[in-house]
Each structure stands twice: as C-alpha cells, then as structure tokens.
Image (tube, helix red, strand yellow):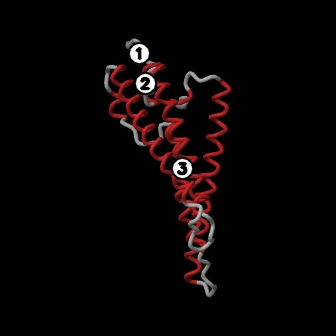
Amino acid sequence: MTEPSSRRGLPPALRRIGAVVSGAEIAVGALALLTILVLVFFQALQRYLPIDQIAWTGEISRFSLVWLTFVVAGVLVSTRGHIALEIADAIPNRMVVRAVQVFAMVVVCATGVGLTIEAWALVTTQGIVKSPVLRIPMSWVYIPVLLGAVSITVRSAIAAVSVAVNGPVLREQEAEDHMNPMPGETAS
C-alpha cells in the first residue's frame, strides 16, 4: 500500500501526529457507526416487543450519523478515499495530472474553509437551542462537525502542497506498473 498523499515529504514527527489524529478519527467514526447499528436495531425491536418506546434512541442515531460523516471525512481526503478525478490520472502528461490534483485539493480546501466557518457559527450560536429529547445544547452536537471540517481543511491543504511539491499521486496499480515495467519495457 502506498503512503497517503498528504504525508509524502512530511517530517516524521508530523507523520506520527497525523497517524494519531487519523486513529482517533477512525475510532470516533467506528464508535458512531456501532452506535447507529445498535440503536437502530433496538428501535426495530421496540416496535415488536411489549416494552415502552425509548425516544432518545432515534435522536442519538441521527446525531451519530452526522458525526460519522464529518469526523472521518478528513481521513478520506488524506487516503484518497473521497471522490476523485481518477480518470485524469491516466493523462500521459504528469504536469497536467499534477495541476488537476492540486486544483482538486484546493477546491476541497476551500469547501472545508466554508464548512469550518459555518460549523463555528453553529457552535457559537446554537447553545441556547436544546435537542428535542435529551435536551442537550445543540452547540455540543455541532462540535464534532467543526472538528471534521477543520480536519478536511488542514488535510486537503497539506495534500495540495504535497502534490505541488512532490508530484501527482498515482493509483496504486499505475504506480506499481511504473516501478516494475514488463520485460522489454523501460521504466519511466
């Protein structure tokens, strides 16, 4: 497996920090996914069992879906798991591929900045609003969204700089083909 695009050329200390942050984001995402699974299954059971309905299960499930979406989005950016223009990777001119990848990361970064600004506005203004069932401040609900938006912004900026400095990130198979040419071919 190749190294994520956002980590190429970074000092080892920053790589370790990135690995720890990625691990934390994945752990929170896994917990959110497990929460959704358990609570939605429990909601289905509540319909068929002669027990009282528990209203907060639906609220926590919805919040967990939002948290899952935003918390792991930064990891997807740095591992090329997000939507990408992989068709552009096949262009023979590496400078064009580099330009397309840098432009794509700059667009993701700009989107992340917009998301961060809006998430910050929600965190700072929605403290008075309470969730319908649990009555927790909605600003608390938006904190993981803010952290995910910041992660998207930082990781896409790092990836854009990394691609601009180190060259384009190729798909794994294409990169292996360049490193291990067929007999009779020359490495490019």
Q: Secondary structure at mark 2?
A: loop
Distance, label 1 to label 3, CA atoms, is 56 Å
Dot 3 crowding, Cα within 10 Å, few <14, some 14–19, many 20+: some
Residue picked out by circle 2: 168
Labels 2, 1: front one: 2
Tell me the quarter of the picture where residue 37 sits.
Answer: bottom right
At a point 35% along the width and 29% down the height, the residue shown is: 100
Q: Nearer the viewer, residue 136 or 165?
A: 136
- Which label's residue is closer to the chain start, 2 or 3? 3
Report the amino acid beneath label 3: Trp
Q: Nearer the viewer, residue 132 or 173?
A: 132
Q: How many marks?
A: 3
Residue 22 lies, in percent from the top left, at 61, 40
Residue 2 lies, in percent from the top left, at 53, 29
Tell me the quarter of the picture where residue 102 sits.
Answer: top left
Labels 2, 3: front one: 3
Residue 164 lies, in percent from the top left, at 44, 22
